[in-house]
Amino acid sequence: MLDCGLDMTSTLNFLPLPLVQSPRLSKLPGLVLKDGSTFLDKELKECSGHVFVDSVPEFCLPETELLDLSTVDVILISNYHCMMALPYITEYTGFTGTVYATEPTVQIGRLLMEELVNSIERVPKAQSASTWKNKEVQRLLPAPLKDAVEVSMWRKCYTMPEVNAALSKIQLVGYSQKIELFGAVQVTPLSSGYALGSSNWIIQSHYEKVSYVSGSSLLTTHPQPMDQASLKNSDVLILTGLTQIPTANPDGMVGEFCSNLGRSLSEVLCVFYHLLDLPWQNITSRGESENVRCSFEKPEKLHEKFVMSEFLFLFQLIQTNKLKHYPSIHGDFSNDFKQPCVIFTGHPSLRFGDVVHFMELWGKSSLNTVIFTEPDFSYLDALAPYQPLAMKCVYCPIDTRLNFIQVSKLLKEVQVMKSCCLLLCFFTHSSEINKLFLADSLVPLEIKPGISLATVSAMLHTKDNKHVLQLPPKPPQPPTSKKRKRVSDDVPECKPLKPLLSGSIPVDQFVQTLEKHGFSDVKVEDTAKGHIVLLQEAETLIQIEEDSTHIICDNDEPLRVKLRDLVLKFLQKF
């Protein structure tokens, strides 16, 4: 198994967890459905036109239905972002295998999971919302809850005992270390250049070489540079974790970040620009910084470490009270707090953690600014439960992962035999989906100005859990000889589909057409749903409605067919 990341965007559907009682959140009105029902008013709350779940935030787990995870022998972890779902897999699926990851990945991942657990557990919720997850109830809800996928699989956060149990199954590895798996394949972690300890993996047998490239970066930062040479001559390259914002240059975003800080705090620009170049990922709300850097840093940064230039700089900031660290907003923080200041806090979803308190505290003043640097969360959705908001909001997403241009160049350099790019494909309503299969057989027909439709006739081919629409087989040709055909020669019979009809029937023109074809004494009556055309001599009735047309005559099939053909002249077939 390659990675086990946790989809945290599901938390955006929940109300924030304030550290202190929030009168604003507690007074939010409950949801009233269109039919006036109020049975969900305890679970769902309305805020500024959005609906949120009033419960402990829940997370969308990795897919567990397609594969029995108890049969998985090995999990390879690329970076600490890709291990946040590990406790759900190791503690709930019967997994008994081994997890491989580098030491920085494990230690930083531990800190992130501990912080996640502590942020949620310190603000317990009395009620738990589950009624809205019923499919029959969910379809009655407004978006985005109505469109949320697999809500029945959403789970609450794991506990610290589960985190410790999951981490105990991890075996530490180093870059370029070769690990034999059951004598069948050999796996090797390589530096990906994205974060401290982040890895790409080589999976190699005696005959084939598969490279798994997860979040990787070519920028010059603290981690060791990306090892591209070892990826050469791979039979298959699996590529995932590309940047979500390919048009946003990281250097430009850092500059914009600093300029926005400068509008409020011009005197400390040099301080925070340097802080962006520090391994801030190693520091959590516990005030701990793990010494896991040495073997995973680039040599230049390693030299700076030994001459203590970085730490002398940090020491000076701490001595002059320009840089302070607090385990929480309680205690010393409340006593030392002064403005103006810049606070680094989380979580980027704005649903739990100390950031909820600051949003409630500072959101009412236009003198304050919140800056989003996390690219994986929609900042507009994150801000939704805090509206109306007076403070300024700035979106400066900083994502150093590979973009499409860099990937194209990488593929040429490593000379991969076959590449496979894995990206989650999400489609929204009215989005356009392009597929090459069957494209040549589609003939769009314009039914209204600017609107065209085409029907798809195909057979669903299913094999190895892959489902592909293929062109239907041609009708069998009549046998040229009298030989008996074999059973294996039988081809599934595809019955011709009836054409779909579109358009409206102009009644006046239809009456004129009837008169031209010998029908006299034609009368038209208007109804609530359309029109009725009476052919008195033929004792026939034609009902024309918006979505249907009926021809009623007594046992006169030739007449019915003739009238049907006249009706079809006014409709489009496709």
Image: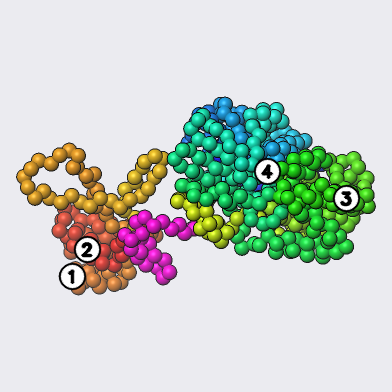
Classify mark 3: helix, strand or loop.
Answer: helix
Look at discs 3 and 2 and give the one toward the viewer: 3
Classify 132 as above or below 473: above
Magenta-drawn stretch contains 106: no
Please tell me whether mark 1 or mark 4 is closer to you in this view. Answer: 4
On screen, residue 454 versus residue 363, left or right, reads left
- SS at circle 2: helix
Q: Quadrant of residue 100?
A: top right
For disc 2, the marked residue is 565
The residue sitting at 87% across, 52% down in the picture is 313
Q: CA distance from mark 1 to mark 4?
A: 83 Å
In the rendered structure, which amino acid carries the disc numbered 2? Asp
Residue in the picture at 71% in, 31% down: 160
Measured as percent of width and height from the top left, residue 386 is found at: 73, 52
Cα distance in 3D space between marks 3 and 1? 100 Å
Residue displayed at 89% across by 52% down: 317
Determine which residue is flagged by label 3.
312
Q: Secondary structure at mark 1?
A: loop
The amino acid on which the numbered mark 3 sits, given as a three-letter code, is: Leu
Contact? badges 3 and 4 (CB < 8 Å): no
* In the image, farthest residue toward the left: 482
Judging from the image, the colouring scheme is: rainbow
Task: Please name the residue shown 30% across and 52% down the image.
Answer: 471
Mark toward the viewer: 1 or 2: 2
Question: Which labelled disc corresponds to residue 517?
Answer: 1
Q: Residues within 10 Å of mark 2 (few under 14, many from 20)?
A: few
Specify the segment rendered in magenta. 425-454
Which quarter of the image is occupied by the C terminus? bottom left
The amino acid marked with disc number 1 is His
Identity, as a three-letter code, of the amino acid under mark 4: Gly
